[in-house]
Amino acid sequence: MNGLLFNIQKFSLHDGPGIRTVVFFKGCPLRCKWCSNPEGQAEKPLFMGEGGSAPDSRLYSIEETLEICLQDRPFYEESGGGVTLSGGEALTQGEFAAALLSALRKEVIHTALETSGYAPAEVFNEISALADMLLFDIKHYDGRRHIEGTGVDTGIILSNLKNALAQKIPVLPRIPVIPGYNDSLEDASGFASLIKSLGLSRAQLLPFHQFGERKYELLKMPYTLRGVPQLHKEDIEGFRRIIADSGIECFF
């Protein structure tokens, strides 16, 4: 069994607890306007580089992927880390994601699934049950605005999220804070209400950055947020405080 991956990033400190290896899957059903990994949207290899000659991804077997992940086992054990499946969206390659999570579980490696939650219920339920935790991206609390920013509705997403919580799977909601889209103080209150209604008590904020801007040029893809200033923690401290004041542990 092979999976199409565009990166395996070692020593990540921001994608789950401890030191982690992040496996980036190709394919995503969302089209977030701020996406920092636009190459992850397509379900087939794209070509980057100045001459457009370098493929952005390749096929990996379960054995090869597992071998790479296990190289950093001492760091996982020392830091309480592990492996995170990201993308793109790992749920678009459900069979490979399930097999990799199962293999990592046999090795007693902590696993996290970073997901938008947008997938058929049967796929989501099978794969989320194999992960030790979900890093669940919540782009917007308002369904109409969610469509405007990502191209998809929140119905399937919230249904899957509630299902995961009912199954007692640890979930950390993560909010990408995007200028002009969901960064107002009113938006902070909206997110706080949604998170509390789900019975969750923690949330992580992901300030907007421009790390992926150059990729759009290399891929000849339109990018509507070109030139928009990055957000820093101090820029959205008021946003964070509103969520925190509602009784939610909110952190960066």
Image (tube, helix red, strand yellow):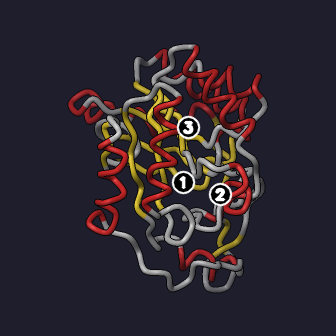
Q: Where in the figure is residue 21, as x and y percent of width and height?
A: 41, 42
Q: Quadrant of residue 79?
A: top left
Give the secondary structure at mark 1: strand
Q: Earlier in the sequence, mark 3 or mark 2?
A: 2
Q: Earlier in the sequence, mark 1 or mark 3?
A: 1
The residue where tag 3 is placed is: 64
| Number of residues whose C-alpha sits closer than 10 Å to that of mark 1, classed few (under 14), some (14–19) or many (20 or more) | some
Name above or below for residue 189 compared with residue 231: above
User: For the view shown, which residue lies furthest in the left direction?
Assistant: 78
Q: Where in the figure is residue 207, as x and y percent of width and height?
A: 40, 62
199 to the left or right of 79: right
Q: Which mark is residue 7?
A: 1
Q: Nearer the viewer, residue 248 or 170?
A: 248
Q: Nearer the viewer, residue 239 or 92?
A: 239
Residue visible at 75% across and 47% down?
153
Measured Cα–Cα span from mark 3 to mark 2: 20 Å
227 to the left or right of 145: left
- Residue type indicated by callout 1: Asn
Q: Nearer the viewer, residue 151 or 40?
A: 151
Q: Mark 2 near mark 1, Cβ–Cβ under 8 Å?
A: no
Measured Cα–Cα span from mark 1 to mark 3: 13 Å
- Residue type indicated by callout 3: Glu
Name above or below for residue 190 compared with residue 66: below
- Residue type indicated by callout 2: Gly
Give the secondary structure at mark 3: helix
144 to the left or right of 134: right
Q: Earlier in the sequence, mark 2 or mark 1?
A: 1
The residue where tag 2 is placed is: 40
Residue visible at 58% across and 75% down?
215
Residue visible at 53% across and 34% down?
113
